[in-house]
Amino acid sequence: MSPSTYAGKFSAANGWYEYAISSTSTVEITFNDGNGVWDSNLNANYVRTSPGTYAFVNQNTATPTTAPSIQGYVNGPGYSMTSASDTAGVLTINLAVNTASISTSYGTDLSALVVTVTKTETDSVRVKIVDKNNKRWEVPKSVFTTGTLGTDSSSTSDAVDALYSFNYTQNPFTFQVVRKSDGYTLFDSSGISLVMKDQYLQVSTTLGSDLSVYGIGESTRDNFKMASGDKQTLWARDQGSATPIVNTYGSHPFYLGINSAGQAHGVLLLNSNGMDVTMDSGHLVYQAIGGVLDFNIVVGPTPAKVVSQYTKLIGRPKLMPYWSYGFHQCRWGYGSVDALRTVVSKYKSNNLPLDVIWSDIDYMKSYHDFTLDPTNFPQAKMAAFMDEIHASGQKFVPIIDPGIPDDTNDYAYTKGLSMDIFIKDTSGKPYLGQVWPGPTVFPDFFHPNAKTYWAEQIQLMYKNYSFDGLWIDMNELANFCPGTTCYDNPPFAINNVNSHDAIYNKGISTSALQYGNIRQYDAHNLYGITESIVTNAVQEELANKRSFVLSRSTFPGSGVHVAHWTGDNAATWNDLRWSVPTILKFGLFGIPMVGADICGFSGSTNVELCARWTALGSFYPFARNHNNLESPSQETYVWPEVITVGQKFIGMRYRLLPYIYTLGYHAHVDGLPIARPLLMEFPTDTSTYNINYQFMLGNAL
C-alpha cells in the first residue's frame, strides 16, 4: 500500500478501518488527512500481522507526523508470455502487460517487454528485461574497459555444461535461477510484482531462509551482513561517511549471498539509475527510477569464487604500484611547501615510515585545478620539493576536482570551451554549477575528446612539478548550487539521504546533458568511473609506469582503474568501527585497494583513539592519515604514545609489504580481496557470518 493512499473505508477521526487480507500478512497503515500523515500507536506505524479485515485506529496526534521513509511497493498487474525462442544459446521471451488491472502508481506500465537470457560463462548467466517498443538507457559497454560485460560475446559452449538452470512461469511471468550442484535457488522473482514504467522499475528476489546477504552500497553501516528492514539507496552523493545509513559516494548494486551449507552466489543488477534496494520479509526488493533490468548472476559456490567470477564480469582490479601500499600522510590545511616539507621531516626524525605525502586543494591558486598558488606553492619551490622527496624514494599525490572555474583567464576553461567539452544544460550551454572556486563547469568524460583535453591539462601540471599519483575528488558530481527540472523530481522518490531528499541536491541537475544526449538522470552514478578511466589512462601514459589514482566516487568496474577511500569520516570510535564493514564490502565490489582516513577526517581526535586507529589502519589495504582544515593536527608524530604505536604497527606493515603486495597481485589476477571477511576463508563455519569487525589480510593473517 503506497503512502497517502488506501483502498478501504475510513472517514471518522476515530474508528474502524476496513481492509481486505485473505491470509496472514503484515500491513503498514498510515493515514493522510491533507495536512500530514497520522496514525495510531503514538505516531508509530500500525502494523497488522494476523488475518482479518478490520483494525482500530485513533487520530491521536495534535501535530501530524512526517511521511514514513518506506514507500510502498506497486501491486502491479504483472506480465504474461506471448512467445519464446531459443537461438544460438540465447533464450528470448516476449511479454505483454496484463491489462486487466494496470497500476497507475508512478506512471503507466510499459505495454510490452523482451527478456533475453544469455549464458556469459558456464558459471554465470545474464537476464535482461527491456522495453520492446522503445530503446531505454543502459549502462554503456565503454564503462567496462576489461571484463566480459564490455564485450558483445556470450559463451560459445553448450547450455548443458552450464552450472545453473533457468526456469520461468508464463502468467504471470516470473523466473528462477537454480544452481545445479545443490538445487539451491539463487534468484526467484515470484515474490513481488514485476513492474516496468518509464521512471519506475520494480523486481524482487525471494531469499532463502538460511541466506546471509552482504554488499549493496555505498553507505556507512555498523553491520557487514544485511539485516531485515535494511534499505540501501544507490545515488552517488557528496555526503560524508560519518553519517551512517544514508547513501554516500558510489553505487554498487551487487551482493554476495551465502547459505548455511557455506554455498555462495552473487547478483549484480547492472543499472546506473538511482534506486532503493530493501531487504524486506524474506525478499530483496529493487526499486529503480530508470534504465533496464539487467541481472548478472554468478553461481559460486564458494565466496572466493563468487568474487572471482564477479570481477571477471566487471574487470579484474588494478595492480597498484608497490609504493602505494606504504603509509600515506595528508591533510586539508597544509598551506605551503614548507608545511609539506616539515611533515616529511618529522616523520623521518621520529623514525616513522612514510612513503607518500599528499596535498589537498590548498596548493591551488584560488582553488583552480592544474594551478599553483604562487605565494605559498611557487613553482620552483614545488619542483625542488619533488626532487627532495624523490631522492629519498618518497612520492607526492595532489588532488584535482572535476569543476573547472568559469573564468576566461583560466586556460582549462577556455580550452574546454574551444573543444566543446563541458556538460550542457537543456539550452545547449555549458552547465554552470558551483564548487570550491565559485561558478564552475564540468568536463564530460563521455565526450570522445575528453581524454585529449584532460591529458593536456594534467601534462601542463606535471611540467611544473613531477607528482606521482592523482587524487580525484568531488566526482559524484558534487555541486553546491543545485537546480530543478522534471527529471529532478521523478514520481518515485528514492530514499536519498534517508529522507527522500531531491536527487538534484548537492549535485548538478539531472536534466543536464552529456555527449550523445545522455542525461545526468541516467548517468549520474557513472561520472566517477568515467573520470577514473580517463585519469588513470592519462597518468599511466604520462609516467610510462603503473599509476596510482584515488577516487571518491565509484561504480562496478572502478577497481580496474583506481583505489578508493571511504570519504569524510569523523574522529569517533564509531567511525573507527564502521570502517571495517565498509572496507570489506569494497573487497566484494572488486575494489580491494581501499581504506579509511586514519584517526578521522572531521572533529578532534585524541591520543587513545588515534593510537588505536593507527594500529588498525596499519592493516588497511590503503593506509592514509588524513583530516580537515578545522581539526587539530593528528599526524602520527603528534603524541609520544602514538609515535610508539606507529613505530610498532606501521613498522609491522612495512615488514609485511611483500605479503600485502602479493595479495594485490592475486587481486589483480583472480579478483580476490586483500582484506577479507572471515566467511571468505571459513565459509562452512556459520559463526563467521555475523562477524562485522574482524577481518583477514589474505588467507594467512
Image (cartoon, grey):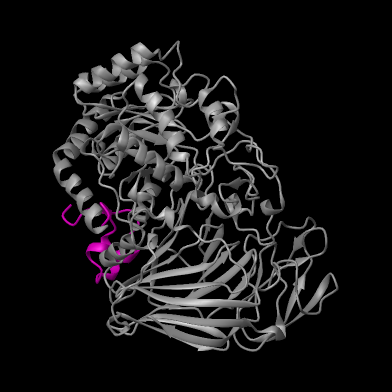
Q: Position of residue 49 (x, y in %)?
A: 60, 79
Where, by quadrant of the figure, is residue 545 drawn?
Answer: top left
Is 566 left or right of 698, judged from the image as shown?
Answer: right
Is 525 left or right of 73, judged from the image as shown?
Answer: left
Image quarter (top left, top right, bottom left or bottom right) of the N terminus? bottom right
Relative to 96, does residue 390 appear above or below in the rendering? above
Q: Nearer the viewer, residue 145 or 236?
A: 145
Q: Nearer the viewer, residue 572 or 659?
A: 659
Q: Position of residue 184 (x, y in %)?
A: 35, 82
Is 395 left or right of 271, judged from the image as shown?
Answer: left
Relative to 659, does residue 388 appear above or below in the rendering? above
In this view of the protein, can residue 436 be seen by the observer?
A: no
The magenta stretch is 672-701
Judge whether residue 319 is colored magenta. no
Q: Residue furthest right?
A: 12
Q: Residue at x 30, y 50 (%)?
A: 592
Q: Position of residue 456 (x, y in %)?
A: 42, 30
Q: Nearer the viewer, residue 382 or 618?
A: 382
Judge whether residue 673 is colored magenta. yes
Is 15 left or right of 232, judged from the image as shown?
Answer: right
Total label count?
A: 0
